[in-house]
Amino acid sequence: MGVLQVFDLQEKVKGKSGAASACPYCAGPVLAWDFDADLIFFCCIPISHKTKRKFYCTICSRRLVPVS
């Protein structure tokens, strides 16, 4: 019995830049990655498009979540 996958999330790296902050765990420099995220329906029909920014530490490789 197979399960048909209806939705697919595709992320493509758009760019990288240095963030003006330090990692709270190791005090290393932080990079900000910009992603283009597309939610694809069934095979090829795009439903939504978002630009996301994720933060990563360059030394300990943790994903950091900004506090608002």
Image: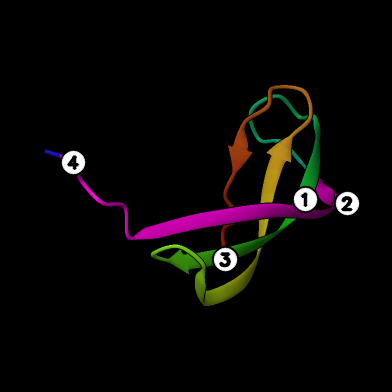
Report if the CB atoms under discs 3 and 1 are less than 8 Å apart. Answer: no
Q: Which residue is mark 3?
A: 38
Left-right relation of 6 to 60: left
Check disc 2: other Cα within 10 Å, few if <14, some if 14-19, many if 20+: few
**Residue drawn at 38 percent across, 64 percent down:** 42
Mark whose residue sits in front, 4 or 2: 4
* Type of amino acid at the residue the image marks with label 3: Asp
Left-right relation of 22 to 25: right
Q: Height in image: 16 above or below 44?
A: above
The residue most toward the left is 1
State the mark number for residue 5: none
Q: Which residue is mark 4?
A: 2
**Residue drawn at 49 percent across, 66 percent down:** 39
State the mark number for residue 17: 2
Q: Which residue is mark 1?
A: 32
Q: Main secondary structure of the magenta part?
A: strand
Mark whose residue sits in front, 4 or 3: 4
**Residue drawn at 62 percent across, 54 percent down:** 11
Of marks 4 and 3, which one's residue comes earlier in the chain?
A: 4
Q: Which residues are magenta?
A: 2-21
Mark whose residue sits in front, 1 or 4: 4
- CA gap, disc 3 to disc 1? 19 Å
Nearer to me, 18 or 20 = 18
Residue 25 position in % (x across, y down): 64, 28
